[in-house]
Image (cartoon, grey):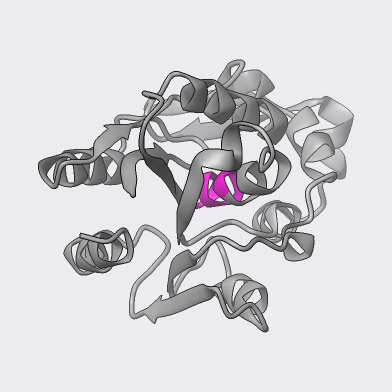
């Protein structure tokens, strides 16, 4: 039985994001122990997916011993949730029962190429100025994020866990076809495409109802 939920925010976001606060508050009202870790680790400038996975593992170890766990991941948080369930399945991830992925950035490198074009300048400079929505300003972000992400192939990940994916048909940041590709021939994946954008903020109540049903409420 799922008693604990970790909400994983996306790139250039934080636990103070609108979506994070919404799901933390509403799921807590339904009796879940909800935690929203800060995934800007070790800090935003030196962010890596590997460090994000380690941060989730740390948060899992801090949970009470009883009760199952679900991860809800938004955008890069969805990428993090998927690879945590894969890489840590025999360790901290053994307690996971279900995943919810919101507009998951499953092909992180392709998203960056489409957003920025040629990545050579970023590689040559070593850093890029990136707007951090929660900080309200541009912050430096190192190219090591790209180098680290190259070792993670989402489409090669096969899990036995039930997975619910919501993705907007008008997502300009992460093509919804990434979720379509991942869901193909994976019967445990429930993909729900919505008439919305990457943020999915106009569908929060709709998704909450679906998430609660998926988690067994």
Q: Specify the segment rendered in magenta.
A: 74-81
Q: Is residue 148 magenta?
A: no
Q: Position of residue 183 (x, y in %)?
A: 60, 76
Q: Position of residue 203 (x, y in %)?
A: 24, 67
* Residue 106, quarter of the rendered image: bottom right
Eyeballing the image, is 95 above or below 142?
Answer: below
Eyeballing the image, is 177 above or below 88?
Answer: below
* Residue 5, quarter of the rendered image: top left
Eyeballing the image, is 185 above or below 43?
Answer: below
Residue pictured at 65% horizontal, 60% vertical: 159
Residue in the foreground of this view, choosing between 216 and 44? 216
Residue pictured at 61% horizontal, 51% vertical: 82
Q: Position of residue 59 (x, y in %)?
A: 47, 24
Q: Position of residue 187 (x, y in %)?
A: 58, 80
Residue pictured at 79% horizontal, 55% vertical: 153
Eyeballing the image, is 160 above or below 96?
Answer: below
Quarter of the image with the C terminus in it? bottom left
Query: Is residue 67 in view from this perspective?
Result: yes
Residue pictured at 66% horizontal, 47% vertical: 83
Left or right: 125 in relation to 10: right
């Amino acid at each position: 039985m799922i008693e604990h939920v970790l909400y994983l925010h996306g790139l250039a976001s934080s636990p103070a994001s609108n979506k994070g606060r919404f799901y933390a508050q509403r799921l807590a009202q339904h009796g879940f122990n909800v935690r929203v870790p800060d995934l800007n680790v070790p800090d935003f400038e030196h962010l890596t997916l590997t460090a994000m996975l380690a941060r989730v593992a740390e948060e899992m170890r801090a949970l009470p011993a009883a009760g199952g766990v679900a991860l809800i991941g938004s955008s890069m948080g969805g990428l993090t949730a998927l690879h945590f369930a894969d890489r840590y399945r025999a360790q901290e991830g053994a307690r996971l029962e279900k995943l919810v992925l919101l507009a998951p950035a499953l092909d992180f490198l392709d998203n960056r190429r489409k957003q920025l074009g040629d990545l050579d300048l970023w590689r040559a400079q070593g850093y890029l100025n990136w707007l951090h929505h929660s900080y309200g300003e541009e912050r430096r972000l190192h190219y090591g994020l790209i180098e680290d992400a190259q070792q993670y192939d989402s489409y090669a990940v096969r899990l036995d866990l039930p997975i619910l994916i919501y993705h907007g048909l008008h997502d300009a940041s992460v093509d919804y076809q990434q979720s379509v590709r991942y869901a193909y021939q994976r019967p445990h994946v429930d993909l729900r495409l919505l008439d919305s954008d990457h943020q999915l903020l106009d569908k929060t109540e709709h998704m909450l109802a679906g998430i609660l049903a998926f988690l067994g409420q």
